Amino acid sequence: MIRSAKIPAEKQPPPSFRRERALLKRGVGPVAGCDEAGRGPLAGPVVAAAVVLDPKRIPKGLDDSKKLTRARREELFDEICATASVAVTVASVARIERDNILRASLWALARAVRALPESPCHVFVDGRDRLDVNCECEAVIGGDALVVSIAAASIVAKVARDRLMCKLALDHPGYGFESHMGYGVPVHLEALRRLGPTVHHRRLFAPVAAMLQASAQADEGSVLRPVA
């Protein structure tokens, strides 16, 4: 049996415009890519973006946002917004806790598609789940590394969310939101233990829920009993 060699991440080709171009040649357009940022953090909203690239003005260097430096993402964010049609939407912590993280993310992605200046005829979305939109929707696993429109959306969503978390850091100093963007890193967990959760923490996520439960039990155990 012949096994195909796995290509190291650093040697994988960048995402291409191949899928979008094939659709445009058939007269199917506009074609959008969409992605979200912020499913995993313990705090902050999910931010979704939808992008329709101009085939003649695609910024150079577009890639999965996770592969780019923060400075490069900021540069590309500006280029994307200057050359493409872009829409950004947010799923709040309240919606995440009400609907669950997957449904809230899919809601935000579909809303971003509907918010584009011109309705697309075809949408590529990163992941396994298709969206409830009024056009063809194609889910692409690992799409941010394969489809350049999705890669562009991943950059927009990531930069928009990072900027939002930096603003929250000003309102809630001590948590380090500006550095870890709400993810459950040790410094964030330590701040949670020391300061308690903010209104921006996802109280149904396991680490936050466990901390709240422990705090409630400690408070219950500290109630003073009358002396017999």
Image (cartoon, rainbow, N blue to C red):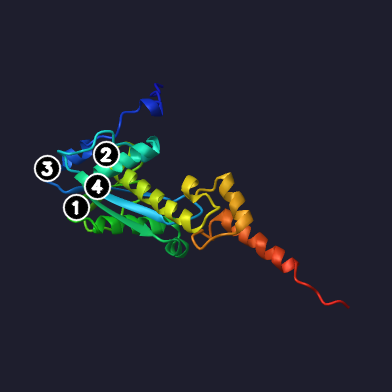
- What residue is pinned by disc 4? 81
Residue 129 seen in the figure: yes
Circle nearer the viewer, 3 or 1: 1
Circle nearer the viewer, 4 or 2: 4
- What residue is pinned by disc 1? 120
User: On the picture, is 80 further left or further right than 38?
Assistant: left
Mark earlier in primary sequence (4, 2): 4
Q: Distance between the residues labelled 3 and 4?
A: 26 Å
User: On the picture, is 134 further left or further right than 161?
Assistant: left
Give the class, few, some or many, for how many residues have Cα within 10 Å of label 2's Cα (few <14, many ≥20): many
Q: In this view, does 224 lie above or below 19?
A: below
- What residue is pinned by disc 2? 148
| Labels 3 & 2 near each other (Cβ < 8 A) | no
Circle nearer the viewer, 3 or 4: 4
| Labels 4 & 1 near each other (Cβ < 8 A) | no
Q: Distance between the residues labelled 4 and 2?
A: 15 Å
Q: Which residue is drawn at 75% across and 67% down?
A: 222
| Labels 3 & 1 near each other (Cβ < 8 A) | no
Q: Is residue 29 or residue 154 the one in the foreground?
A: 154
Rendered location of residue 133, percent (x, y): 26, 58
Q: Distance between the residues labelled 2 and 1?
A: 16 Å
User: On the picture, is 171 further left or further right than 54?
Assistant: right
Mark earlier in primary sequence (2, 1): 1
Amino acid type assigned to the residue bearing label 1 in the image? Pro
SS label for mark 4: helix
- What residue is pinned by disc 3? 26
Residue 143 seen in the figure: no
Q: Residue at x 71, y 63 (%)?
A: 218
Mark earlier in primary sequence (3, 4): 3
Give the class, few, some or many, for how many residues have Cα within 10 Å of label 1's Cα (few <14, many ≥20): many
